[in-house]
Image (cartoon, rainbow, N blue to C red):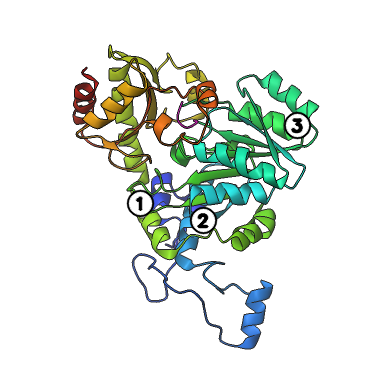
Amino acid sequence: MNKENNSLGFETLCIHGGHTEESNRSHLTPIYASSTYTFDSAEQAAAIFRGEEKGYIYGRWGNPTINEAEERIALLEAYGLKDKTGAQLQLKAILHASGMAAVTTMLLSNLKAGDKIITHHSLYGGTHEILEKILPNLGIDAIIVNFHDHSLVEETIKANKDIRLIYIETPANPTLQCVDIEALASIGKSHSLTVCVDNTFATPYLQQPFKYDVDFVMHSTTKFLNGHGTAIGGIVIGKDIEKMKGIVTKTHRLFGGNSNAFEAFLLTNGLRTFSLRMDRHCSNAEKVASFLENHPEVAKVNYLGLTSHPDHTTAMKQMKHAGAMLSFELKGGFDTGVKFINKLQVCISAVSLGTCDTLISHPASTTHVGVSREQRLKFGITDGLIRMSVGIETVEDIINDLNQALQS
């Protein structure tokens, strides 16, 4: 493409963003299945190693297929945003082998022994476990508070001078709790803290955290960005380009959480239909949420598009749409949840999300099995909670399947 990426529309960037002409004129950037790369001379090798000349060295350090995915997602997160000088916001992204690898790189490149993180309830189970079971062994502790209470957040930061980072996941997994990115980022910046946001549930199509001056955004690219359930991946995006090229890249390379060309190819292919898929996901989710809210076997529906959700106003402030994710509580508790899952015929029982098909899971027995029941209930993850990633099937088929599975 000859046109500058910065002047292209969002949907066009989903298809063409980050693509450069390939030497053999392949329509799509091919899968570069090579572990290492050659040099024309010893002098060129030295120049590339010193960063004086662009070039690839080793698969763990970079790959053309991976780089296209990184650049495309960075462009989507920066779409329409300006930096403090009024110029188009520039971001750098690093693709990882998984979402947890991306989260780990971000945490370990920003924290050291003695530092603390402030975060909130109802995080993704894997994130909660790394904060609770891995980081304390490295001398890094997490303080969990109610992020809806901004005065409490401010007071906690003032009382704990070792807090270095605010970790936000919004909407949160699986309760669909939504917190105010702008307000929390403002508090963080007033105390010179690093602010990071897990944007997996919303995606850059619905929410752009960099609009609120955050430092890092992470995604599990496995989910909506890939969209087809074909590849595991994660990405960390940062606005401090030098830091991203420095300690963040160094941490990523040395911990070995790099992606690979095949999964990067599947990701870029999935991104080509990203905006189209999200429109259908969101439309279907609205109708499913409305159905569930009026069903006699459902005690509660967590969907940000419903005015009954306590975070509805916050979500509509910072999101283009309430999204494709919802959860709901069954009146019968744990056993009813198990029976419901077993009766599904169209919807799929699986623990991931963001694929074309509707995926449903029971967090108490799957994603949050590593979290104690006491903590789980504190976070709003009840025994009968069902998480649902609404797919792009004919919406009447989704609703009919839910209806028959809900029959006692």
Q: Are marks 3 and 1 in contact (CB under 8 Å)?
A: no
Label 2, label 1: how many angstroms apart (C-alpha)?
Answer: 15 Å
Classify mark 2: helix, strand or loop. strand
| Residue 292 visible in rendering | yes
Q: Is residue 223 left or right of residue 102?
A: left
Q: Considering only vertical position in the picture, is 238 above or below 324?
A: below
Q: Amino acid at mark 3?
A: Ser
Q: Amino acid at mark 1?
A: Gly
Instruction: Read off the residue under disc 3.
Output: 190
Query: Residue at 47% across / 62% down in the picture?
Result: 66
Residue range corresponding to the magenta coloring: 171-175
Label 3, label 2: how many angstroms apart (C-alpha)?
Answer: 30 Å
Of callouts 3 and 1, the N-terminal one: 3
Q: Considering only vertical position in the picture, is 31 above or below 203?
A: below
Looking at the image, is mark 2 or mark 1 nearer the viewer?
A: 2
Percent x, y of residue 351? 37, 39
Classify mark 1: helix, strand or loop. helix
Q: Which mark is residue 270?
A: 1
Q: Quadrant of the C terminus?
A: top left
Query: Residue at 42% across / 52% down in the picture?
Result: 232
Instruction: Read off the residue under disc 2.
Output: 95
Q: Amino acid at mark 2?
A: Leu
Query: Residue at 42% across / 76% down in the picture?
Result: 23
